[in-house]
Amino acid sequence: MDDYRENGEGWLRRRAEDLIDRMRRNPRSMALPDGADLVHELLVHQAELQIQNRDLRDTQDALEISRQRYLALFDLAPVGYVILDSDSVVLEANRMACQMLTMSHKNLIGKPMIALVDAAYHEAFVRYQRRVFRDNVPGRSGVQSGCELLMPGRGGGAFFAHVESMVMGEPGSDEVRCLTTITDVTTQKEAAEQRRELESRVQQAQKLQSLRVLAGGIAHDFNNLLVGILGHADLALLDLPLAAPARSAIGEIRRAALRAAELSNQMLAYSGQGSFVVGPVVLNELLVEVEQLLRSALPDQVALRLHLAADLPPIDGDVSQLKQVLFNLLTNAAEAIGESAGMVTLRTSVERVSHGFFDPRLTPEALPEGDYVQLAIEDTGCGMDEDTLERIFEPFFSTKFTGRGLGLAAVLGIVRGHHGALRTSSQEGRGTVFQIVFPFSASAGSTSDQPITKPLAIRRKPIVMLVDDDETTRSVGERMLTRLGYGFELIATGREAQELLRQRSSDFSAIILEMALPGIDGASTLTALRALNPLVPVVLTSGHHSEQFAELLEGELAQGFLQKPFNVQQLAEVIESVLGRKGSGASS
């Protein structure tokens, strides 16, 4: 048996054949023990063959189970699998790959992989496959970095696929294969694109909000300077004789300051802090009223057309601010049309607005879905590209060499100040449409019942406390109050105002309080002053519009509001209004 294990099956066969040959030649010369040994060895060999056959069947069964498991994992995998040859032809594909590519297994086998890729991505796929076979050597583990492709999908559509490949097989053989996974990443790409768009919108909204804060701050400081310029100019005109040569120059200074005040008001409008006088307004009536003015503002070659909806509900608005919106947008439309003939159309309607209408970059306030009054301004001008459309509402952005870039920025601020929203659509060569929506009016009251006060006579000398941190405002305020015949105390901080009122509570007939004080702000100072003397009238003053302080003005904390920049006449009117005095003027 040891001889068998050493020499193998061939040795045993040769020995058996030799023994049979000797028995044929001389049957009697064959010894029984030799034959018995041979039979024994043959039986042992047969038993060993049976064991080997059983082990071989067990191995084959295990291989089949392993193969079935592999096929199940391959075929039922949640991603697409394709096996390619060295020419990138599909040799095998799993069920998911067939579903993703909307092809039967039979039709998919034998297809060149490049035929399954959108034509725009052919070059990218070829480069990727070259890199796969160059860098990913067969027999070495590792998956080649992926590639994104556009592939045909369900319903005649397409999907974005992320493919990763690994080379298998012996180096240099004809059996080199490339195992490629296909993962549908369309949803992830759409989510990433939406996230990028949202981030871009948030960044744009933050930038615009920063610009609004900056514009509001600049306008506030600018208005303080204008108080000094206009105030001193008015006082100089009051002091100079009518024939004085300097009156003309001072008048020009005053007119320039008023134009500067208009620019400041545009910055305040952009920041949403403009000065509004709000009441019910029917847009149809406003458009009819200003139609001739609008036509005169357009060049002769540009026609104006109005389409006004019947029974349009009123909105709460400031007529002068709404007129500014109309004129700014018409001016913009006329410049877009240029020298060519064109048309500007104004449309009013009631529209049901969904959240999709509101652009978070332009409408930071969360407005509800529902019915709104819509004003649409359409032109047949040159239109705008996407980059320009993204920036048109930025302050100081202009496509005109001489433009200030505040027209559309002011429009946006006015619309926001009216709790409305704005959307713009444009296409180069096809014109532009501005859609503005306003909420319905909360009341139907008249806007013409506002009391008008006139400066009245001062028969005694009341004392007014002027609280303002700006030195220029205090200086011109001193001259104005002196001119009007009032006594005064000029205070720079809220803390000083509280201390002075505590010491002289009954001395003051009125207090003029700047709301943007450093340290203790105007609102906190007002509350403290009211606790010290609840009877003294308080006039709030600010470069921002009065709506920001509506709660204070509608209650009993404050009795009046003085918009900056102001002149002597306006100061006299507001003081006499809160004092409730009647007369013909102030005496010095």
Image (spheres, grey):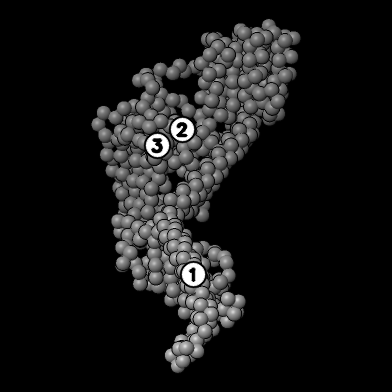
Taking the spot 44% from the left edge, 35% from the top edge, the residue there is 415
In the rendered image, the quadrant that contains the C terminus is top right
SS category of the residue bearing label 1 = helix
- Which residue matches tag 2? 366
- Using the image as rendered, state which of residue 360 and residue 168 is in the foreground: 168
- Which residue matches tag 3? 355
Percent across and percent down for residue 244 are: 61, 32
SS category of the residue bearing label 3 = helix
Q: Nearer the viewer, mark 3 or mark 1?
A: 1
Alpha carbon separation for disc pair 2 and 1? 89 Å
Question: Sequence-wise, which precedes: disc 3 or disc 1?
Answer: 1
- Which residue matches tag 1? 47
Alpha carbon separation for disc pair 3 and 2? 9 Å
Percent across and percent down for residue 154 are: 32, 56
Identified by mark 3, the residue type is: His
Identified by mark 1, the residue type is: Ala
> Residue 97 is drawn in which quadrant?
bottom left
Taking the spot 64% from the left edge, 22% from the top edge, the residue there is 522
Q: Residues within 10 Å of mark 2 (few under 14, many from 20)?
A: few
